[in-house]
Image (cartoon, rainbow, N blue to C red):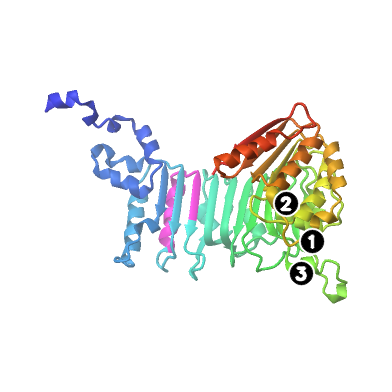
Amino acid sequence: MEGSNKANPSSRDLISTLPDDVLCYILSFLTTKEVALTQVLSKRWSYLLQLVPILDFDDSLLQNRKMGRGQTKVFMEFVDRVLLGRVTPVKKVSFKLRPLGNENPIRVCQWIRNVMGLGVLELSLSFGDLKSYTTFTLLVQVLESKSLVKLRIGGIRLIPNSVSPTVNTLVLDSVKFTDGFEAILSAFPNLQNLRVHESKGWYCWDGSVSSQTLKTFVYRRDDDTSGPKRCVTFDTPGLVHLEYSDVVADKYENLRLESLVEARLDLLLTADQIMRKNAPDNVGFVPGDVSTLFRGIRNVKILCLSPDALDTLYYRSDKKIPVYNNLISLSLGSDRPHGSPYIFWKLLPSMLLNSPNLQTLIIKGLVHYVKKGWEVGWHLRLSWDDVSDALSSSALKVLHVTGYEGTGEELSHMACFLGKLSHLEMVRVTYKVVYDGERRRLVNDLLCLPKASSKCKVQVMKESV
């Protein structure tokens, strides 16, 4: 037998000979439940669970209908065994828990205190089904730590009764507050990155952000049932990156965005904001002007506007596009079949003319802005001379078109782009899956278009899934 083992090296347990830190790195890609199962392999593996730097506790992985409430007890005892006897530090811990009974929140808070004591750097807390009537309440005091840097919480009610000075990244995913949004910012005084996601019934942001340290702010609301916010303010002089997806507010003011480098806007209009924009005050005028917002972001270098944001700029502004002297990259549209062709081509000349240093233009889903839809005859109401003149005077170097389908209308617009943009150096066109014969035709049509720039190169690539 001994000779057989020597002749067949593959029969040896080579992985168990690896150092602890290498094994722990490998195990960190598994769930904590899966890591625990490796303890039965041998004594070599029995203690590694206490050394793995990443812990993931998800009670949905223990679902067993036959056990009923017993499965919750099994899960909680498992977490106790892993945490209560551990003394080695952890880097990242995640809790994903379903609605808890009245006796369990204290136990969960003890778990959180345990990982805080172990020097956790990243903590994720997700509690229950958002449609459940059971809401877990968490005190910021429980999160006190000298090491915590990144915090993600979801499906809970947060009470800001203390200060957590080490956290620089905070993600709020469907969270409720008791003392308002500003109190949360005060509880994390050194915050640099803040992401807020609101779903139906879980609204926390009142529209005001005031922070001297904040560099990134991302806000997204999934529905418009609660209506527009009365006022949105960004008192954030150090903000560098802004992603803002919401119903257009009644007004925008106190916009301190002088350091802003990148802005991504997805603004949704309500039916009343569109239909009653010109109504007199005494017959149902509905507020909502974004002119101040677009002037407030005029220092950006990168600007991305969704189809809804373009509609908003057209319907609810003073039609005076600010001059974006610093803008070098502009992205318009969406890969989804959405948006108004008329508004897209109506605003494009102004965006180009008011961005004198623009180098890159990205058009997402060009095909959506050439097909005839509900706007019958929209192409007849446009001044194509304005489009042509704006392209001819532009210093664009890079044009990127996504979602290309190779229709005759698309090819006609591509011919206009390549024939008028005299400074172009690169054109990238990505297309969706087509048959080989169709792909060859699509590529040949684009490569054969005449170019105003002798430096222009055309790349045609399949879109990555």
In front here: 387 or 100?
387
Q: Is residue 109 magenta?
A: yes
For numbered disc 3, what is the local secondary structure?
A: helix
- Quick check: 450 above or below 158? above
**x 40%, y 60%: residue:** 107
Q: Position of residue 203 (x, y in %)?
A: 62, 64
**What kind of residue is marked 1?**
Lys
Q: Which residue is mark 2?
A: 369
Residue 420 visible from this viewpoint: yes
Magenta residues (range): 105-125
Q: Is residue 259 left or right of residue 216?
A: right
**x 34%, y 50%: residue:** 33
- Report which quarter residue 184 is drawn in: bottom right
**What kind of residue is marked 3?**
Asp
Quadrant position of the C terminus in the picture: top right
Q: Is residue 134 magenta?
A: no
The span from disc 2 to disc 1 (Cα, nearest Å) is 30 Å
Mark found first going from the N terminus, 1 or 3: 1
* Residue occupying the far bottom of the picture: 283
Q: Position of residue 138 (x, y in %)?
A: 51, 60
In front here: 267 or 22?
267
The span from disc 3 to disc 2 (Cα, nearest Å) is 25 Å
Which is closer to the viewer, label 1 or label 3?
3
Which is closer to the viewer, label 3 or label 2?
2
Q: Position of residue 438 (x, y in %)?
A: 60, 42
Residue 85 visible from this viewpoint: no
Q: Which residue is mark 1?
A: 251
**What kind of residue is marked 2?**
Tyr
Q: Which residue is mark 3?
A: 272
